[in-house]
Amino acid sequence: MELIFLTVDDVIFIQSEILSSASGAVDRHRLVHLLRPYIAAIEELKQIQENYEVFDPADYIVNPVALARLQAGITQEELAKLMNVTQAYVIKIENQEKVTSKIMQEVTKAITKK
């Protein structure tokens, strides 16, 4: 999709076209013709917005440690520093299929002190 932006020059041009008639009357058909590409672009953007689905990491990430870290907006390295462990350890617990409640408590505690 090609985006069409209405620049100041476009507005000035359209305004001059509208006001150029001798009577000062607005030629509705001419105005519609000038604005048609902009109206079409706006309608296309509205359609895209209606079809847009918000990305929710919880739909794709099953490991609660990885999910909590991503939702906190921190890297594995940052989480490791907050937990006083190595990044390798964070990678290990994020790759586990099951995480104990004790590990989750440690992760939560670390993230909240961020």
Image: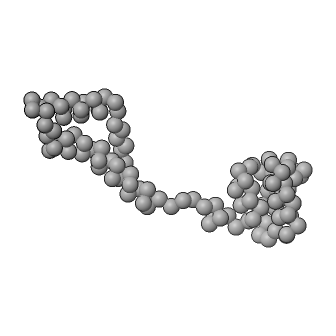
Give the quadrant of residue 14: top left
Q: Residue at x 30, y 44 (%)?
A: 38
Taking depth in this image into account, of 43 and 67 the one nearest to the observer is 43
Where 34 falls versus 8 (above or below)? below
- Percent from the top left, x then y, of residue 4? 34, 41
Q: Residue at x 29, y 47 (%)?
A: 39
Q: Residue 107, percent across and down?
A: 83, 59
Residue 111 placement, left or right of 52: right
> Residue 16 placed where, x, y %?
21, 29
Percent of width and height locating residue 72: 73, 53
Look at the picture and state if 58 lies above or below 10.
below
Front residue of 83 and 28: 28
Residue occupying image coordinates x 33% and y 47%: 41
Res 108 → quadrant:
bottom right
Which sits in the foreground, 77 or 45?
45
* Residue 17 in the figure: left or right of residue 53: left
As drawn, the residue found furthest toward the right would be: 84
Q: Is residue 33 visible?
A: no
